[in-house]
Amino acid sequence: MRAAGRNPAQYKQPPITMPNPIYQPGSADINYPQGNDWGTQFPAYYGSFDALVGVYNLAPNATGNANAHLDAEISLQNRSQFHGSGQTYIPWNPGTTPANQAENSYVGAEQRVGQISAQAYMALWLNHLHPKCFDNSGTPRPPNVPPAQPIAVSRISGDTRYTTGVEVSKRQWANAGGDTTPRAQADAVVLARGDNFPDALAGVPLAKRDRGPLLLTEPGKLNQATEWEIQRILPKGKTVYILGGNVAVSPAVQDRLVRLGYKVQRFGGSDRYDTARRIAVDGMGAPHQVVVATGLDFPDALAAGPLAAGEGNAILLSDGKTLDAGTKAYIAAAQHKPDGSADPAFHLNAVGGAAVAATKYLGGQSHALMGADRYATAAAVANRFAADMPVTQLGVATGMQFADALTGGAFMANAGNPLILTDPASLSPADVPLLATMHNQISAISLFGGPVAIKQTVMDQITRAVGGVKR
Protein backbone atom coordinates (compact mmCIF):
# COMPACT_ATOMS: atom_id res chain seq x y z
CA MET A 1 0.00 0.00 0.00
CA ARG A 2 1.63 3.24 -1.09
CA ALA A 3 0.15 5.15 1.85
CA ALA A 4 2.44 3.31 4.25
CA GLY A 5 5.65 4.74 5.55
CA ARG A 6 4.46 7.88 7.35
CA ASN A 7 6.84 8.99 10.04
CA PRO A 8 5.06 9.98 13.27
CA ALA A 9 7.72 12.58 13.92
CA GLN A 10 6.11 14.61 11.14
CA TYR A 11 3.30 15.45 13.54
CA LYS A 12 3.61 17.65 16.60
CA GLN A 13 2.48 16.24 19.90
CA PRO A 14 -1.19 17.17 20.14
CA PRO A 15 -2.78 18.67 23.25
CA ILE A 16 -4.05 16.04 25.64
CA THR A 17 -6.98 16.96 27.84
CA MET A 18 -8.35 13.84 29.47
CA PRO A 19 -8.77 12.77 33.08
CA ASN A 20 -6.95 9.46 32.71
CA PRO A 21 -3.42 8.50 31.66
CA ILE A 22 -2.94 7.01 28.22
CA TYR A 23 -1.37 3.90 29.75
CA GLN A 24 -3.04 2.40 32.80
CA PRO A 25 -0.43 0.89 35.18
CA GLY A 26 -0.73 -2.86 35.46
CA SER A 27 -2.62 -3.08 32.19
CA ALA A 28 -1.66 -3.58 28.56
CA ASP A 29 -4.31 -1.11 27.43
CA ILE A 30 -3.72 2.28 25.85
CA ASN A 31 -6.44 4.91 25.77
CA TYR A 32 -6.49 7.26 22.83
CA PRO A 33 -7.13 10.81 24.09
CA GLN A 34 -10.67 12.01 23.74
CA GLY A 35 -11.77 15.14 21.94
CA ASN A 36 -8.66 15.60 19.83
CA ASP A 37 -8.19 15.68 16.08
CA TRP A 38 -7.45 11.98 15.66
CA GLY A 39 -10.84 10.80 16.79
CA THR A 40 -12.72 9.78 19.89
CA GLN A 41 -11.59 7.42 22.64
CA PHE A 42 -10.39 4.04 21.35
CA PRO A 43 -8.46 1.59 23.55
CA ALA A 44 -5.74 -0.45 21.88
CA TYR A 45 -3.26 -3.05 23.03
CA TYR A 46 0.50 -2.77 23.23
CA GLY A 47 0.77 -5.84 21.08
CA SER A 48 -1.06 -3.95 18.36
CA PHE A 49 1.76 -1.43 18.21
CA ASP A 50 4.34 -4.07 17.42
CA ALA A 51 3.13 -3.70 13.84
CA LEU A 52 4.47 -0.14 13.95
CA VAL A 53 7.92 -0.69 15.40
CA GLY A 54 9.44 -0.45 11.94
CA VAL A 55 8.68 3.25 12.05
CA TYR A 56 11.14 3.54 14.95
CA ASN A 57 13.54 0.88 13.60
CA LEU A 58 12.90 -1.29 16.66
CA ALA A 59 12.90 -5.05 16.93
CA PRO A 60 9.34 -6.39 17.24
CA ASN A 61 9.91 -8.03 20.63
CA ALA A 62 7.94 -5.83 22.98
CA THR A 63 4.56 -7.53 22.83
CA GLY A 64 3.02 -7.29 26.27
CA ASN A 65 6.08 -5.51 27.63
CA ALA A 66 5.09 -1.91 28.20
CA ASN A 67 8.38 -0.95 29.81
CA ALA A 68 10.45 -2.23 26.88
CA HIS A 69 8.32 -0.27 24.48
CA LEU A 70 8.52 2.91 26.50
CA ASP A 71 12.25 2.70 27.15
CA ALA A 72 12.94 2.48 23.44
CA GLU A 73 10.51 5.25 22.57
CA ILE A 74 11.84 7.59 25.24
CA SER A 75 15.41 6.98 24.15
CA LEU A 76 14.55 7.79 20.55
CA GLN A 77 12.77 10.97 21.55
CA ASN A 78 15.44 12.13 24.03
CA ARG A 79 12.87 12.53 26.80
CA SER A 80 13.40 12.31 30.53
CA GLN A 81 12.37 9.02 32.11
CA PHE A 82 9.76 9.98 34.70
CA HIS A 83 7.55 12.77 35.85
CA GLY A 84 5.30 13.01 38.82
CA SER A 85 1.64 13.74 39.29
CA GLY A 86 0.83 17.21 38.04
CA GLN A 87 4.04 17.47 36.03
CA THR A 88 4.97 17.12 32.39
CA TYR A 89 8.22 16.52 30.53
CA ILE A 90 10.92 18.89 29.39
CA PRO A 91 13.52 18.05 26.71
CA TRP A 92 16.06 15.64 28.17
CA ASN A 93 19.85 15.80 28.06
CA PRO A 94 22.31 13.47 29.80
CA GLY A 95 22.79 14.49 33.43
CA THR A 96 19.70 16.64 33.74
CA THR A 97 17.04 16.08 36.34
CA PRO A 98 13.63 14.67 35.42
CA ALA A 99 10.94 16.97 34.13
CA ASN A 100 9.58 19.40 36.67
CA GLN A 101 7.32 21.74 34.73
CA ALA A 102 3.83 21.98 36.21
CA GLU A 103 1.03 20.65 34.04
CA ASN A 104 -2.49 20.29 35.36
CA SER A 105 -3.90 18.47 32.34
CA TYR A 106 -2.85 15.08 33.75
CA VAL A 107 -4.30 13.53 36.85
CA GLY A 108 -3.05 10.43 38.61
CA ALA A 109 0.03 8.73 39.93
CA GLU A 110 3.53 8.96 38.55
CA GLN A 111 3.67 8.03 34.87
CA ARG A 112 6.43 7.46 32.38
CA VAL A 113 6.67 10.27 29.86
CA GLY A 114 6.33 7.77 27.05
CA GLN A 115 2.83 7.03 28.32
CA ILE A 116 1.91 10.58 27.38
CA SER A 117 4.16 11.63 24.53
CA ALA A 118 5.38 8.60 22.61
CA GLN A 119 2.01 6.91 22.46
CA ALA A 120 0.38 10.18 21.47
CA TYR A 121 2.69 10.27 18.49
CA MET A 122 1.88 6.67 17.68
CA ALA A 123 -1.84 7.19 18.11
CA LEU A 124 -1.78 10.19 15.82
CA TRP A 125 0.30 8.35 13.23
CA LEU A 126 -1.97 5.32 13.42
CA ASN A 127 -5.09 7.37 12.88
CA HIS A 128 -3.60 9.27 9.95
CA LEU A 129 -2.80 5.94 8.33
CA HIS A 130 -5.71 3.85 9.65
CA PRO A 131 -8.47 6.10 11.06
CA LYS A 132 -10.44 4.45 13.86
CA CYS A 133 -8.61 1.13 13.68
CA PHE A 134 -10.17 -0.07 16.95
CA ASP A 135 -13.71 0.09 18.16
CA ASN A 136 -14.66 1.10 21.72
CA SER A 137 -14.12 -2.41 23.05
CA GLY A 138 -10.56 -2.53 21.74
CA THR A 139 -11.45 -4.94 18.95
CA PRO A 140 -9.45 -4.33 15.77
CA ARG A 141 -11.49 -3.29 12.76
CA PRO A 142 -10.53 -2.78 9.10
CA PRO A 143 -8.72 0.49 8.41
CA ASN A 144 -10.91 3.28 7.10
CA VAL A 145 -8.45 3.98 4.29
CA PRO A 146 -9.30 3.70 0.60
CA PRO A 147 -7.16 1.08 -1.11
CA ALA A 148 -4.33 2.26 -3.31
CA GLN A 149 -5.55 2.62 -6.87
CA PRO A 150 -3.71 0.66 -9.55
CA ILE A 151 -1.66 2.69 -11.99
CA ALA A 152 -3.74 3.66 -15.02
CA VAL A 153 -1.99 2.75 -18.27
CA SER A 154 -3.57 4.43 -21.29
CA ARG A 155 -2.83 5.15 -24.92
CA ILE A 156 -3.23 8.52 -26.68
CA SER A 157 -3.28 8.23 -30.44
CA GLY A 158 -4.84 9.28 -33.71
CA ASP A 159 -4.86 7.96 -37.25
CA THR A 160 -1.76 9.97 -38.22
CA ARG A 161 1.07 11.78 -36.48
CA TYR A 162 -0.90 15.00 -36.93
CA THR A 163 -4.08 13.68 -35.35
CA THR A 164 -2.08 11.99 -32.59
CA GLY A 165 -0.71 15.43 -31.74
CA VAL A 166 -4.26 16.76 -31.70
CA GLU A 167 -5.46 13.96 -29.41
CA VAL A 168 -2.56 14.63 -27.06
CA SER A 169 -3.52 18.30 -26.96
CA LYS A 170 -7.17 17.48 -26.28
CA ARG A 171 -6.19 15.61 -23.12
CA GLN A 172 -4.44 18.64 -21.65
CA TRP A 173 -5.91 21.90 -22.97
CA ALA A 174 -9.36 23.38 -22.44
CA ASN A 175 -11.58 25.09 -24.98
CA ALA A 176 -10.59 28.69 -25.68
CA GLY A 177 -13.84 29.94 -24.20
CA GLY A 178 -13.47 27.77 -21.11
CA ASP A 179 -15.17 24.51 -20.25
CA THR A 180 -16.09 22.40 -17.25
CA THR A 181 -13.10 20.05 -17.47
CA PRO A 182 -9.98 20.34 -15.27
CA ARG A 183 -7.89 21.00 -18.38
CA ALA A 184 -5.67 24.09 -18.46
CA GLN A 185 -6.12 27.16 -20.65
CA ALA A 186 -3.48 27.40 -23.38
CA ASP A 187 -1.66 30.70 -23.84
CA ALA A 188 0.25 29.75 -27.00
CA VAL A 189 0.84 26.98 -29.53
CA VAL A 190 4.20 25.74 -30.79
CA LEU A 191 4.01 24.51 -34.40
CA ALA A 192 6.56 22.32 -36.16
CA ARG A 193 6.72 20.40 -39.41
CA GLY A 194 5.63 16.80 -39.01
CA ASP A 195 7.79 15.14 -41.65
CA ASN A 196 11.25 15.95 -40.30
CA PHE A 197 12.69 16.58 -36.86
CA PRO A 198 15.70 18.98 -36.84
CA ASP A 199 13.99 22.32 -36.26
CA ALA A 200 11.60 20.89 -33.68
CA LEU A 201 14.17 19.32 -31.33
CA ALA A 202 14.50 22.39 -29.11
CA GLY A 203 10.79 23.25 -29.01
CA VAL A 204 9.53 21.37 -25.94
CA PRO A 205 10.87 23.85 -23.33
CA LEU A 206 9.23 26.68 -25.29
CA ALA A 207 5.87 24.90 -25.13
CA LYS A 208 6.23 24.56 -21.37
CA ARG A 209 7.38 28.15 -20.87
CA ASP A 210 4.49 29.64 -22.85
CA ARG A 211 1.85 27.12 -21.72
CA GLY A 212 0.67 25.35 -24.80
CA PRO A 213 0.87 22.18 -26.88
CA LEU A 214 3.34 21.36 -29.60
CA LEU A 215 1.41 20.53 -32.76
CA LEU A 216 2.50 19.33 -36.20
CA THR A 217 1.74 20.46 -39.73
CA GLU A 218 2.70 19.69 -43.30
CA PRO A 219 5.40 22.07 -44.52
CA GLY A 220 3.36 23.56 -47.37
CA LYS A 221 -0.06 24.01 -45.76
CA LEU A 222 -1.58 24.12 -42.31
CA ASN A 223 -2.83 20.65 -41.45
CA GLN A 224 -6.61 20.74 -41.16
CA ALA A 225 -6.88 18.79 -37.89
CA THR A 226 -4.14 20.96 -36.40
CA GLU A 227 -5.92 24.13 -37.55
CA TRP A 228 -9.13 23.06 -35.87
CA GLU A 229 -7.28 22.24 -32.65
CA ILE A 230 -5.54 25.61 -32.62
CA GLN A 231 -8.91 27.32 -33.01
CA ARG A 232 -10.41 25.16 -30.25
CA ILE A 233 -7.82 25.96 -27.59
CA LEU A 234 -6.29 29.33 -28.48
CA PRO A 235 -8.15 32.65 -28.23
CA LYS A 236 -7.71 35.06 -31.11
CA GLY A 237 -4.80 37.42 -30.63
CA LYS A 238 -2.61 34.81 -28.93
CA THR A 239 0.69 33.66 -30.41
CA VAL A 240 1.61 30.64 -32.51
CA TYR A 241 5.35 29.96 -32.54
CA ILE A 242 6.66 28.40 -35.76
CA LEU A 243 9.83 26.33 -35.50
CA GLY A 244 12.06 26.54 -38.56
CA GLY A 245 12.54 28.76 -41.56
CA ASN A 246 10.40 29.14 -44.68
CA VAL A 247 11.56 25.81 -46.09
CA ALA A 248 10.59 23.93 -42.93
CA VAL A 249 7.20 25.64 -42.54
CA SER A 250 6.13 27.68 -45.55
CA PRO A 251 4.91 31.30 -45.53
CA ALA A 252 1.51 29.91 -46.59
CA VAL A 253 1.14 28.32 -43.15
CA GLN A 254 2.07 31.58 -41.47
CA ASP A 255 -0.37 33.55 -43.63
CA ARG A 256 -3.18 31.16 -42.78
CA LEU A 257 -2.56 31.60 -39.05
CA VAL A 258 -2.60 35.38 -39.42
CA ARG A 259 -5.91 35.22 -41.30
CA LEU A 260 -7.31 33.13 -38.44
CA GLY A 261 -6.53 35.99 -36.07
CA TYR A 262 -3.29 34.87 -34.43
CA LYS A 263 0.06 36.51 -33.91
CA VAL A 264 2.92 34.51 -35.37
CA GLN A 265 6.54 34.42 -34.26
CA ARG A 266 8.97 32.32 -36.25
CA PHE A 267 12.22 30.85 -34.91
CA GLY A 268 14.18 30.06 -38.04
CA GLY A 269 17.94 29.93 -38.27
CA SER A 270 20.43 29.13 -40.98
CA ASP A 271 20.47 25.50 -39.80
CA ARG A 272 19.15 23.32 -36.95
CA TYR A 273 21.86 24.54 -34.56
CA ASP A 274 21.07 28.17 -35.23
CA THR A 275 17.34 27.53 -34.88
CA ALA A 276 17.91 25.96 -31.45
CA ARG A 277 19.95 29.00 -30.39
CA ARG A 278 17.26 31.39 -31.62
CA ILE A 279 14.67 29.51 -29.55
CA ALA A 280 17.00 29.76 -26.55
CA VAL A 281 17.70 33.48 -26.97
CA ASP A 282 14.44 34.89 -28.34
CA GLY A 283 12.02 32.34 -26.91
CA MET A 284 13.56 31.30 -23.59
CA GLY A 285 15.38 34.48 -22.57
CA ALA A 286 18.90 33.05 -23.00
CA PRO A 287 18.98 30.94 -19.81
CA HIS A 288 22.31 30.07 -18.23
CA GLN A 289 21.16 26.49 -17.70
CA VAL A 290 21.28 24.41 -20.87
CA VAL A 291 20.80 20.88 -22.10
CA VAL A 292 22.95 19.74 -25.01
CA ALA A 293 21.97 16.81 -27.23
CA THR A 294 23.05 15.78 -30.69
CA GLY A 295 21.17 17.38 -33.55
CA LEU A 296 21.99 14.56 -35.95
CA ASP A 297 19.26 12.33 -34.53
CA PHE A 298 16.16 12.88 -32.44
CA PRO A 299 15.97 10.44 -29.46
CA ASP A 300 18.31 12.14 -27.00
CA ALA A 301 16.93 15.64 -27.51
CA LEU A 302 13.31 14.52 -27.27
CA ALA A 303 13.91 12.47 -24.12
CA ALA A 304 15.65 15.52 -22.66
CA GLY A 305 12.78 17.89 -23.48
CA PRO A 306 10.71 17.49 -20.28
CA LEU A 307 13.83 17.65 -18.08
CA ALA A 308 15.00 20.85 -19.76
CA ALA A 309 11.51 22.33 -19.61
CA GLY A 310 11.02 21.47 -15.96
CA GLU A 311 14.18 23.30 -14.96
CA GLY A 312 13.72 26.25 -17.33
CA ASN A 313 16.65 25.16 -19.47
CA ALA A 314 17.19 25.73 -23.17
CA ILE A 315 18.09 22.86 -25.49
CA LEU A 316 21.15 23.37 -27.66
CA LEU A 317 22.30 20.95 -30.35
CA SER A 318 25.71 19.49 -31.01
CA ASP A 319 26.89 18.46 -34.44
CA GLY A 320 27.47 14.92 -33.29
CA LYS A 321 30.59 14.99 -31.12
CA THR A 322 31.43 18.62 -31.90
CA LEU A 323 29.89 22.03 -31.29
CA ASP A 324 29.53 24.68 -33.95
CA ALA A 325 30.99 28.12 -33.25
CA GLY A 326 27.65 29.72 -32.40
CA THR A 327 26.75 27.11 -29.79
CA LYS A 328 30.21 27.31 -28.24
CA ALA A 329 29.79 31.07 -27.98
CA TYR A 330 26.37 30.75 -26.33
CA ILE A 331 27.72 28.33 -23.71
CA ALA A 332 30.78 30.50 -23.07
CA ALA A 333 28.53 33.50 -22.47
CA ALA A 334 26.23 31.47 -20.22
CA GLN A 335 29.17 30.48 -18.05
CA HIS A 336 29.93 34.07 -17.10
CA LYS A 337 28.28 37.10 -15.57
CA PRO A 338 28.36 40.44 -17.44
CA ASP A 339 31.46 41.42 -15.45
CA GLY A 340 33.30 38.35 -16.75
CA SER A 341 33.30 36.40 -13.49
CA ALA A 342 32.09 32.82 -13.39
CA ASP A 343 28.32 32.51 -13.05
CA PRO A 344 27.45 29.95 -10.35
CA ALA A 345 23.99 29.62 -11.91
CA PHE A 346 25.46 28.03 -15.02
CA HIS A 347 24.71 24.34 -15.43
CA LEU A 348 24.88 22.01 -18.40
CA ASN A 349 23.28 18.60 -18.85
CA ALA A 350 24.85 16.67 -21.72
CA VAL A 351 22.41 14.02 -22.93
CA GLY A 352 23.73 11.08 -24.93
CA GLY A 353 27.23 9.94 -25.73
CA ALA A 354 27.73 12.36 -28.63
CA ALA A 355 26.78 15.41 -26.55
CA VAL A 356 28.93 14.23 -23.65
CA ALA A 357 31.91 14.04 -26.01
CA ALA A 358 31.10 17.45 -27.52
CA THR A 359 30.97 19.20 -24.14
CA LYS A 360 33.71 17.30 -22.33
CA TYR A 361 36.22 20.15 -22.11
CA LEU A 362 33.91 23.12 -21.65
CA GLY A 363 34.37 23.43 -17.90
CA GLY A 364 31.80 24.67 -15.43
CA GLN A 365 29.16 22.61 -13.70
CA SER A 366 27.97 19.83 -15.97
CA HIS A 367 26.29 16.47 -15.74
CA ALA A 368 26.52 13.59 -18.21
CA LEU A 369 23.36 11.60 -18.89
CA MET A 370 23.90 8.68 -21.22
CA GLY A 371 23.33 4.98 -21.61
CA ALA A 372 24.27 2.10 -23.86
CA ASP A 373 21.57 3.03 -26.37
CA ARG A 374 18.79 5.58 -26.90
CA TYR A 375 16.51 3.75 -24.49
CA ALA A 376 19.07 3.61 -21.69
CA THR A 377 19.87 7.28 -22.25
CA ALA A 378 16.19 8.19 -21.97
CA ALA A 379 15.95 6.13 -18.77
CA ALA A 380 18.98 7.98 -17.36
CA VAL A 381 17.29 11.29 -18.14
CA ALA A 382 14.07 10.13 -16.44
CA ASN A 383 16.00 9.06 -13.35
CA ARG A 384 17.70 12.44 -13.21
CA PHE A 385 14.28 14.08 -13.56
CA ALA A 386 12.99 12.06 -10.60
CA ALA A 387 16.03 13.05 -8.54
CA ASP A 388 15.38 16.75 -9.16
CA MET A 389 11.58 16.96 -9.26
CA PRO A 390 8.57 14.98 -8.04
CA VAL A 391 7.24 12.45 -10.54
CA THR A 392 3.55 11.52 -10.62
CA GLN A 393 3.14 10.28 -14.20
CA LEU A 394 5.28 8.71 -16.88
CA GLY A 395 5.12 9.11 -20.65
CA VAL A 396 6.24 6.47 -23.15
CA ALA A 397 6.93 6.94 -26.86
CA THR A 398 8.60 4.89 -29.54
CA GLY A 399 12.31 5.47 -29.92
CA MET A 400 12.21 4.79 -33.66
CA GLN A 401 10.09 7.74 -34.84
CA PHE A 402 10.21 11.33 -33.67
CA ALA A 403 6.67 12.66 -34.05
CA ASP A 404 4.93 11.04 -31.08
CA ALA A 405 7.89 11.70 -28.77
CA LEU A 406 7.78 15.36 -29.82
CA THR A 407 4.10 16.00 -29.15
CA GLY A 408 4.08 13.60 -26.19
CA GLY A 409 7.20 15.23 -24.79
CA ALA A 410 5.46 18.61 -24.72
CA PHE A 411 2.50 16.98 -22.97
CA MET A 412 4.78 15.51 -20.29
CA ALA A 413 6.72 18.75 -19.94
CA ASN A 414 3.53 20.70 -19.30
CA ALA A 415 2.47 18.04 -16.79
CA GLY A 416 5.87 18.27 -15.07
CA ASN A 417 6.83 14.65 -15.68
CA PRO A 418 9.39 12.68 -17.71
CA LEU A 419 9.24 10.79 -21.00
CA ILE A 420 10.93 7.47 -21.71
CA LEU A 421 11.43 5.66 -25.01
CA THR A 422 10.79 2.06 -25.91
CA ASP A 423 11.35 -0.30 -28.77
CA PRO A 424 8.08 -0.54 -30.73
CA ALA A 425 7.84 -4.33 -30.45
CA SER A 426 9.16 -5.08 -26.95
CA LEU A 427 9.67 -3.18 -23.72
CA SER A 428 13.27 -2.03 -23.69
CA PRO A 429 15.46 -3.65 -21.00
CA ALA A 430 16.51 -0.24 -19.67
CA ASP A 431 12.88 0.59 -18.90
CA VAL A 432 12.27 -2.44 -16.67
CA PRO A 433 14.26 -1.27 -13.61
CA LEU A 434 13.02 2.27 -14.10
CA LEU A 435 9.41 1.12 -13.92
CA ALA A 436 10.23 -0.95 -10.84
CA THR A 437 11.73 2.13 -9.19
CA MET A 438 8.99 4.58 -10.12
CA HIS A 439 5.85 2.52 -9.76
CA ASN A 440 5.39 3.59 -6.13
CA GLN A 441 5.49 7.27 -7.13
CA ILE A 442 3.25 7.41 -10.18
CA SER A 443 -0.47 7.12 -10.71
CA ALA A 444 -0.61 7.04 -14.52
CA ILE A 445 1.39 6.05 -17.59
CA SER A 446 0.55 7.48 -21.01
CA LEU A 447 1.66 5.79 -24.23
CA PHE A 448 1.87 8.18 -27.17
CA GLY A 449 1.00 6.67 -30.54
CA GLY A 450 -1.12 3.83 -31.84
CA PRO A 451 -0.40 0.09 -31.92
CA VAL A 452 1.84 0.50 -34.96
CA ALA A 453 4.06 2.95 -33.09
CA ILE A 454 3.97 0.93 -29.84
CA LYS A 455 2.60 -2.58 -30.12
CA GLN A 456 -0.11 -3.82 -27.78
CA THR A 457 2.33 -6.37 -26.35
CA VAL A 458 4.48 -3.49 -25.06
CA MET A 459 1.47 -1.90 -23.39
CA ASP A 460 0.74 -5.27 -21.77
CA GLN A 461 4.34 -5.57 -20.57
CA ILE A 462 4.26 -2.10 -19.03
CA THR A 463 0.92 -2.78 -17.33
CA ARG A 464 2.22 -6.01 -15.79
CA ALA A 465 5.49 -4.38 -14.73
CA VAL A 466 3.72 -1.78 -12.59
CA GLY A 467 0.72 -3.86 -11.54
CA GLY A 468 -1.45 -1.41 -13.42
CA VAL A 469 -4.74 -1.48 -15.25
CA LYS A 470 -5.32 -0.51 -18.87
CA ARG A 471 -7.70 2.36 -19.46
Image (cartoon, rainbow, N blue to C red):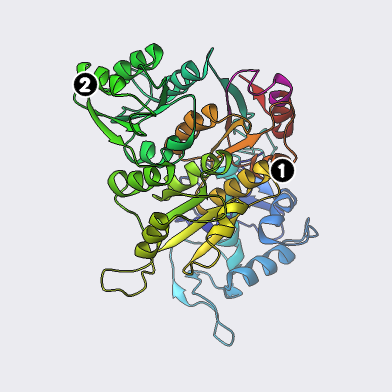
**Among numbered discs 1 and 2, the one appearing first in the sequence:** 2
Query: Which residues are drawn in magenta?
Result: 446-459
**Closest to the observer, 137 or 325:** 325
Q: Is residue 318 above or below residue 168?
A: below
Corner quadrant of residue 420: top right
Q: Residue furthest bottom?
A: 95
Q: Quadrant of the N terminus?
A: top right
Do the residues bearing badges 1 and 2 touch, measured as CB atoms within 8 Å?
Answer: no
> Mark on residue 286?
none
Q: Which residue is mark 2?
A: 258
Q: Which residue is mark 1?
A: 430
**Closest to the observer, 101 or 59:** 59
Residue 286 among those drawn in magenta: no
10 Å neighbourhood of mark 1: few (<14), some, or many (≥20)? many
Q: Is residue 244 visible?
A: yes
Residue type at mark 2?
Val
Residue 451 among those drawn in magenta: yes
**Closest to the observer, 387 or 298:** 298
Corner quadrant of residue 334: bottom left
